[in-house]
Image (cartoon, rainbow, N blue to C red):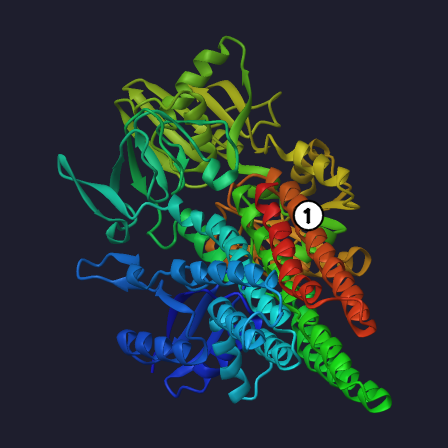
């Protein structure tokens, strides 16, 4: 039976323990084949063979049972009657991430009441005054922390240890030993901290979700002499669409009519507009300027650039790096370990000294401070923020583990054609023979090549200004060139040296030309045609070298004669030419032994094996689908300048993640030691948990702005 994937957002989810409980509940459901929650994006992915409506009800029931305060919003694209695919959200389920305005107001009221009651003495100003104050504080604590207490009691009943359990036990024990004010404040501070923590994490998620706004859901499809607005998902490749001024382009394509300036900043981060006219390739997500454009689509809705960007960023969260995996394993060992230490801290000294109350207070403070939330939330969020920041600069990183590789890359290896070069032939030199001018040679060659589909012929035709095919007879000899007779007694030959030899045309003195032109049996001139180096290649490679990359190497299947000028123009440290795909892989493995981790950049289907062999592979954004699928990074801007940007962002994300680890562990260690010695109050323990989490999350969100 076919497996279907469903996607949901979990509003109010901010705890790794909560996520684990929801995953566990879903995986025990017979209809669910797999369930995975990414805490950084608060997204739940469920794979099942059951129907969509039934699955949504199943998910809601399981989430409600595990974590009642978490709300489920369906993001799964649904197929409507008209065939349009949309992600839909049930807006009636949208509440405040931590329980809504009413719950937040209750916390503030409870906290205010606690502060007021703290100034009310326990003096016996009326019969039972002490108990009145105690009761008022208990009521205020219930008002401030009822949600935490309910969640904690539920976890205790199920024999689970999470942050709600820790806070509930600490508060209850504080009341039991007469520290009612401190116990109530624990609940209030914890809940208020959760609100700030969820708001900070939500800010980061919203920044990344803005990527979805670059993809229009509709397209203006040309039908006959008119146009009709239809779902973009219904437009087939090869169709003609119209894009009005200041609209976003919904599908990849090529302009066939109109001129405009395009804003590609949503895809590439480049703020300068790009001039575009007939023949210019455009990507979905680009914003049109003032001109009306007619575009022939070259890809479907899901295969277009904007859709690929959104899909790659969403999937990136599931590919964890070593740092994230370490934190996950650390949390599994850390939580039971500190719980055992807290029990020992209460039991052993109490037996030795007989002072149970003092050591119970210290043990509870120790337990509250030990919660690992700051690590399990902020580290994945730091790396995912890096993914979001890189995507704004035209670099799609398919997960945290590739950020780690990119941040430490010692060598970058490049393919030649379509990567270091444009992949498009162009005329580099025109050499007229005696009796002809360069302008005349180019005009006649352009007319002769106007109907040819050969890449070299098209380069000459474009250099000539794309003239319309002239009148007369036209014949093409595959592999040789064209024979064009514009008039009865005139013959124009344009093609290779073999075509000239066949018609006994002497090419002496122009043997190094790529294409020759002969008019009425006489050599008129020659053209040099070559694949040109990308204009940004030298600057991009220099930027990588400035960032500390040790080796910049090229692997190509082209001849050494074609490879050498490109290597020199780009300033490469070395190159290997004339390689078959399997030989590229062999060279890559040799380089990996010396310079790991190593990054490979390519664009063709023949690059897929070597992309997979590298520590990380990057594909050009306009490369083949096979290369993009095999790659770990995609340069959606189709520009090499994105590589240096990707390295910078990855290094910053890794730096923030490492800082958060050191910061959280240092603060926790200090508070744990002070708690054990009796110098840390419960408020310090709450700060070590929630306060550190909030600060770490806010630190992670800075990556999106840098």
The structure residue drawn at horizontal position 41% and vertical position 47%, both measured from the top left corner, is 306
From the viewer's perspective, is residue 250 above or below residue 93?
A: above
Residue 452: percent from left, percent from top: 37, 34
Residue 569 occupies which quadrant of the picture? top right
* Position of the C terminus by quadrant: top right
The structure residue drawn at horizontal position 66% and vertical position 36%, both measured from the top left corner, is 540
Q: Which of the two residues, 401 or 58, is positioned nearer the viewer here?
A: 58
Direction from residue 446 to residue 37 in the image, left or right: right
Q: Which of the two residues, 643 or 574, is positioned nearer the viewer here?
A: 643
Residue at the extreme bottom of the image, as rendered: 351
Report if residue 93 is visible in the image: yes
Q: Which residue is mark 1?
A: 652
The structure residue drawn at horizontal position 36% and vertical position 64%, both measured from the top left corner, is 73
Residue at the extreme right of the image, as rendered: 352
From the viewer's perspective, is residue 666 above or below residue 253?
A: below
From the viewer's perspective, is residue 132 above or below residue 410?
A: below
From the viewer's perspective, is residue 385 above or below residue 572?
A: below
Direction from residue 66 to residue 186 in the image, left or right: right
Residue 464: percent from left, percent from top: 42, 20
Report if residue 582 is visible in the image: no
């Amino acid at each position: 039976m076919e497996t279907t994937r469903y996607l949901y957002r979990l509003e109010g989810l901010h705890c790794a323990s909560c996520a684990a409980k929801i995953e566990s509940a879903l995986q025990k459901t017979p209809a669910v084949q797999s369930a995975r929650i990414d805490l950084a994006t608060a997204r739940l992915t469920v794979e099942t063979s059951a129907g969509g409506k039934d699955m949504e009800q199943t998910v809601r029931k399981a989430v409600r049972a595990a974590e009642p305060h978490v709300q489920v919003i369906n993001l799964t694209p649904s197929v409507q009657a008209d065939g349009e695919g949309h992600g839909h959200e049930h807006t009636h389920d949208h509440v405040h991430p931590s329980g809504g305005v009413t719950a937040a107001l209750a916390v503030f009221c409870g906290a205010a009441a606690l502060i007021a009651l703290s100034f009310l003495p326990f003096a016996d100003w009326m019969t039972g005054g002490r108990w009145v104050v105690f009761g008022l504080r208990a009521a205020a604590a219930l008002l401030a922390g009822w949600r935490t207490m309910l969640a904690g009691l539920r976890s205790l009943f199920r024999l689970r240890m999470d942050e709600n359990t820790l806070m509930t036990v600490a508060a209850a024990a504080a009341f039991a030993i007469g520290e009612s004010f401190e116990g109530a404040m624990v609940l209030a501070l914890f809940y208020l901290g959760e609100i700030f923590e969820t708001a900070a994490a939500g800010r980061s998620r919203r920044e990344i979700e803005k990527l979805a706004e670059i993809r229009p859901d509709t397209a203006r499809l040309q039908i006959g002499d008119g146009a009709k607005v239809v779902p973009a998902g219904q437009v087939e490749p090869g169709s003609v669409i119209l894009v009005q001024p200041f609209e976003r382009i919904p599908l990849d394509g090529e302009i066939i009519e109109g001129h405009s300036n395009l804003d590609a900043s949503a895809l590439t981060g480049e703020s300068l507009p790009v001039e575009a006219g007939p023949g210019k390739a455009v990507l979905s997500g680009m914003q049109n300027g003032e001109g009306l454009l007619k575009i022939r689509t070259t890809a479907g809705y899901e295969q277009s650039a904007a859709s690929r960007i959104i899909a790659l960023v969403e999937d990136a969260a599931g590919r964890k790096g070593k740092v994230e995996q370490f934190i996950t394993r650390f949390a599994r060992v850390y939580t039971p370990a500190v719980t055992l230490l807290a029990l020992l801290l209460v039991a052993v000294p109490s037996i030795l000294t007989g002072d149970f109350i003092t050591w119970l207070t210290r043990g509870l403070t120790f337990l509250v401070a030990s919660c690992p939330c700051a690590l399990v939330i902020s580290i994945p969020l730091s790396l995912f923020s890096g993914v979001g920041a890189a995507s704004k600069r035209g670099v799609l990183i398919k997960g945290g583990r590739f950020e780690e590789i990119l941040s430490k890359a010692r060598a970058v290896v490049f393919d030649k054609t379509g990567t270091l070069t444009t992949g498009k032939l162009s005329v580099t030199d025109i050499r007229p023979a005696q009796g002809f001018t360069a302008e005349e040679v180019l005009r006649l060659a352009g007319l002769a090549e106007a109907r040819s589909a050969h890449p070299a012929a098209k380069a000459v035709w474009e250099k000539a200004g794309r003239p319309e095919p002239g009148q007369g007879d036209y014949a093409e000899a595959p592999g040789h060139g064209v024979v064009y007779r514009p008039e009865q007694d005139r013959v124009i030959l344009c093609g290779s040296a073999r075509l000239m030899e066949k018609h006994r045309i002497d090419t002496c003195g122009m043997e190094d030309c790529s294409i020759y032109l002969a008019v009425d049996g006489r050599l008129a001139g020659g053209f040099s045609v070559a694949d040109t180096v990308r204009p940004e290649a030298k600057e991009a490679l220099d930027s990588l070298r400035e960032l500390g990359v040790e080796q910049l190497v090229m692997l190509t299947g082209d001849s050494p004669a074609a490879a050498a000028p490109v290597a020199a123009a780009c300033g490469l440290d070395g190159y290997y030419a004339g390689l078959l795909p399997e030989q590229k892989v062999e060279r890559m493995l040799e380089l990996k032994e010396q310079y790991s981790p190593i990054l490979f950049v390519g664009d063709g289907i023949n690059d897929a094996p070597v992309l997979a062999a590298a520590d990380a592979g990057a594909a050009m954004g306009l490369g083949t689908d096979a290369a993009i699928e095999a790659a770990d990074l995609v340069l959606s801007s189709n520009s090499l300048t994105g590589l240096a940007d990707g390295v910078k962002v990855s290094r910053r994300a890794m730096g923030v993640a490492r800082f958060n680890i050191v910061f959280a562990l240092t603060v926790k260690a200090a508070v744990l030691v002070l708690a054990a010695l009796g110098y840390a109050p419960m408020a310090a323990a709450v700060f070590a948990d929630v306060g550190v989490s909030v600060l770490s999350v806010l630190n992670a969100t800075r990556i999106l702005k840098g």
